[in-house]
Amino acid sequence: MKILVVEDEEALAAALTEILKRNQYSVDTVDNGEDGLEYALTGLYDCIVLDIMLPVMDGLTVLRQLRKRKISTPVMLLTAKSDIDDKINGLDCGADDHLTKPFVTGELLARIRALTRRTGEVNVDTFNFHGLTLNKQTYMLSYGNNSVKLSLKEYQIMEVLLMNPNQIITKERFIEKIWGFESDVEYNNIEVYISFLRKKIQSIQSKATIHTARGVGYYLEEK
Ligand code: CA
């Protein structure tokens, strides 16, 4: 899953990024509202952690613009202790949740899990596609009684496929989702990971596998 952090306090932004990465999220971090809006408008994120007091454009304006342009990505606002009005305004502007600074890591992660769960997921710990199951905690990919462990990048690619089961995912989108806009990862890196994944999927005798849409990208399909 991919998270956008919009926070201008350098130490807090770094800590948030570190915590989220350690918990298997892909993270983009920006330090002002204008960049936050630009990134968020791509619609690539599963959740946005948005500070209210930001340079260039404040968080509530970012949020209002997003909702006006029909971007429904779950937003968690970060508010200072005293800003009761901001909380109310935030919810009115279309925020899904808010957290008061300072907060503890466990609560932040629990809230993010709750927000990202709302997008139609039933089981919290696994993704499923026609019997092919991916465990979010252990990175184990299973089919029937067979299991195989995925590496972090394999897991992230599989997660994107399983979250969008009926869509072709382009190589470009994989790169944006997993490595970020500014990475120098090339298309053949994706091809290599896909071939690793196919071997693992084959090793557990899954009927569902990754198909190639020639010249476009990849999708999951049952054989
Ligand atoms: Ca701030």
Image (cartoon, helix red, strand yellow):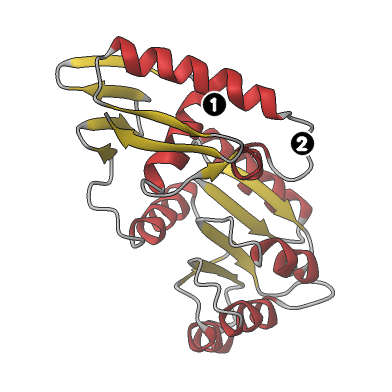
Q: Residue at 49% across / 48% down in the picture?
A: 105
Q: Which mark is residue 153?
A: 1
Q: Quadrant of ligand 1?
A: bottom right
Does residue 37 appear anywhere in the picture? yes
Is 200 or 47 nearer to us in this picture? Answer: 200
Query: Marks 1 and 2: in contact by CB < 8 Å?
Result: no
Above or below — where is 74 with respect to 145?
Answer: below
Q: Which numbered disc covers residue 183?
A: 2
Residue beneath the point at 50% across and 56% down: 46
Q: Residue at x 65, y 62 (%)?
A: 42
Q: Position of residue 1 (x, y in %)?
A: 49, 45
Looking at the picture, which amino acid does disc 1 mark? Answer: Lys
Residue 69, image x and y in percent? 61, 80
Q: Quadrant of the C terminus?
A: top left
Secondary structure under the numbered disc 1 in the rendered image: helix
Q: Does 76 sit left or right of 17 as displayed?
A: left
Q: Earlier in the sequence, mark 2 or mark 1?
A: 1
Q: Position of residue 108 (x, y in %)?
A: 47, 54
Asked if residue 100 is positioned above or below residue 67 in the image, the reply reads above
Q: Quadrant of residue 5?
A: bottom right
Mark 2: amino acid: Ser
Q: Say what secondary structure mark 2 lies in.
A: loop
Q: State the residue at coordinates (32%, 23%).
A: 141
Is ligand 1 less than 8 Å from the beta carbon at label 1? no
- Left of 189 or right of it: where is 121? left
In the picture, the disc for residue 127 is none
* Percent of width and height locating residue 39: 70, 61
